[in-house]
């Protein structure tokens, strides 16, 4: 079908309004189950506050545009596009635009590995050298009185370690030899890269620290070694096709270029945006787990709703509820998840979860979980409120403003009937024990 006529840069594309105004929706939106906010205990009026909050960032030239999606009880109740996908081309944002999701690739690839876990190929505490012998007998860089020493690892790298970013697979380049620095670089394919990294020392003993880095490329590598398939093909056959994720790609087809969103960077004393990369499509042969996928809010909703449903969507079961519960449980005890900016979170099998609401910048229910991408995308799933929240923009750095924290807060204030406490009832939150 032809792409919807684009509106002015600040226009809001809400599903119900689109139907009323145009009688037609983008193809992706046509696949979405839709309901009014009031039918699931949320407020249309209060969703206006969400759009107004996001619009202020656009008006201040902090981002070019955004798409937000909120679903409750499996129904999309808010799907809005604001601003521009490409300011320089005078192209307004639309709800079916495609974003580079960066680290929001990680939960998808980790779900793929957990599907193989369910097929009996490994235990979480099995060493990954079971399928990749090049990662056996690792050494660790340890600072001692005589400087940096290399000592045998206290324990092998396990599947649990690579899923939780506790494997230590990212040693400081300053501590490597010149030949080792060459090994650490990325090659044309995931398999070539992993094979080259086999001899590298670890940054710490596996399990001793939480350090964000390249662990999920090792997850993708395990998917390839166990399944015998390249990870992009595994994802297409086992996740994207069953879930109807038709716009999620490592290589976005050129036919979809008019839906690809430009990437911007903050610049100058006011940190306003300048173009970093215009809309483009390119070919890669590196299909990793750290990043790499592009997607839409509609597609990512289908993945997130599958997780919230306990591993199933529209009759396609990818995981069991018990495995999903395992994935969203804190596996890192009290190790600081520093990338979230506060000591309020634990980390499971590729998801971060809120454990201490009294320390969090996001006003979410304890146990809410999700992750984000380095170019501004983020998602949250609140099991208690049965809510999925997805936000996408393209900005290369965003630490100087709070748009990703404002988004879930404005979603939560739109809830008028809490599933956690019941209509008209309230109750304080208890921190989730992290030991």
Image (spheres, rainbow, N blue to C red):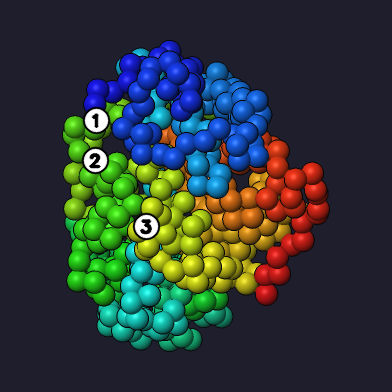
- Kindly report the distance in space between the C-alpha atoms of the residues bearing marks 1 and 2: 8 Å
The answer to whether marks 1 and 2 mark residues whose Cβ atoms lie closer than 8 Å is yes
Choose between 114 and 158: the one closer to the eye.
114
Count up the numbered dots.
3
Choose between 214 and 181: the one closer to the eye.
214
- Residue labelled with disc 3: 315
- Residue labelled with disc 2: 252
Instruction: Say which label, 3 or 1, has the lower sequence index.
Output: 1
Secondary structure beneath label 3? loop
Choose between 93 and 340: the one closer to the eye.
93
Asked whether, in this view, residue 62 is left or right of residue 182, the answer is right
Above or below, 328 relative to 260: below
Which quarter of the picture shows residue 239?
A: bottom left
Q: Residues within 10 Å of mark 2 (few under 14, many from 20)?
A: many
- The answer to whether residue 151 is visible is no
Instruction: Say which label, 1 or 2, has the lower sequence index.
Output: 2
- Residue labelled with disc 1: 257
């Amino acid at each position: 079908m032809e792409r919807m006529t684009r509106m002015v840069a600040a226009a809001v594309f809400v599903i119900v309004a689109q139907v009323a105004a145009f009688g037609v929706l983008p193809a992706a939106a046509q696949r979405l189950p839709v309901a009014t906010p009031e039918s699931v205990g949320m407020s249309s009026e209060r969703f206006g506050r969400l759009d107004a909050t996001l619009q202020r960032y656009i008006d201040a030239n902090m981002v070019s545009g955004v798409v937000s999606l909120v679903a409750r009880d499996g129904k999309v109740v808010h799907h809005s596009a604001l601003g521009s996908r490409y300011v320089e081309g005078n192209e307004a944002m639309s709800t079916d635009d495609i974003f580079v999701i960066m680290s929001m690739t990680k939960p998808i690839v980790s779900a793929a590995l957990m599907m193989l876990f369910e097929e009996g190929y490994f235990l979480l505490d099995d060493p990954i050298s079971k399928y990749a012998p090049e990662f056996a007998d690792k050494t660790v860089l340890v600072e001692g009185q005589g400087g940096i020493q290399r000592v045998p690892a206290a324990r092998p790298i396990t599947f649990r370690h690579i899923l939780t970013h506790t494997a230590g697979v990212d040693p400081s380049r300053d501590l490597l030899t010149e030949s080792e620095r060459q090994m650490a670089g990325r090659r044309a394919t995931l398999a070539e890269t992993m094979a080259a990294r086999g001899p590298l020392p670890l940054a710490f003993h596996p399990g001793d620290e939480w350090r964000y880095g390249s662990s999920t490329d090792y997850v993708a590598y395990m998917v390839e070694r166990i399944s015998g398939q390249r990870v992009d093909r595994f994802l297409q056959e086992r996740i994207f096709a069953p879930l109807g994720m038709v716009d999620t790609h490592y290589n976005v087809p050129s036919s979809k270029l008019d839906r690809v969103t430009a990437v911007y960077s903050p610049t100058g004393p006011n940190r306003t945006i300048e173009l970093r990369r215009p809309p483009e499509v390119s070919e890669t042969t590196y299909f990793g787990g750290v990043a790499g996928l592009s997607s839409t809010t509609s597609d990512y909703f289908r993945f997130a709703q599958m997780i919230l449903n306990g591993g199933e969507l529209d009759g396609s079961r990818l995981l069991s509820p018990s495995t999903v519960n395992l994935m969203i449980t804190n596996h890192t005890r009290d190790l600081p998840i520093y990338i979230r900016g506060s000591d309020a979170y634990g980390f499971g099998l590729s998801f971060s979860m809120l454990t201490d609401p009294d320390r969090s910048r996001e006003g979410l229910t304890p146990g809410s979980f999700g992750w984000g991408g380095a170019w501004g995308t983020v998602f949250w799933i609140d099991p208690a409120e049965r809510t999925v929240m997805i936000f996408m923009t393209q900005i290369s750095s965003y630490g100087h403003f709070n748009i990703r924290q404002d988004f879930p807060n404005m979603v939560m204030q739109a809830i008028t009937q809490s599933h956690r406490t019941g209509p008209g009832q309230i109750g304080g939150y208890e921190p989730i024990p992290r030991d």
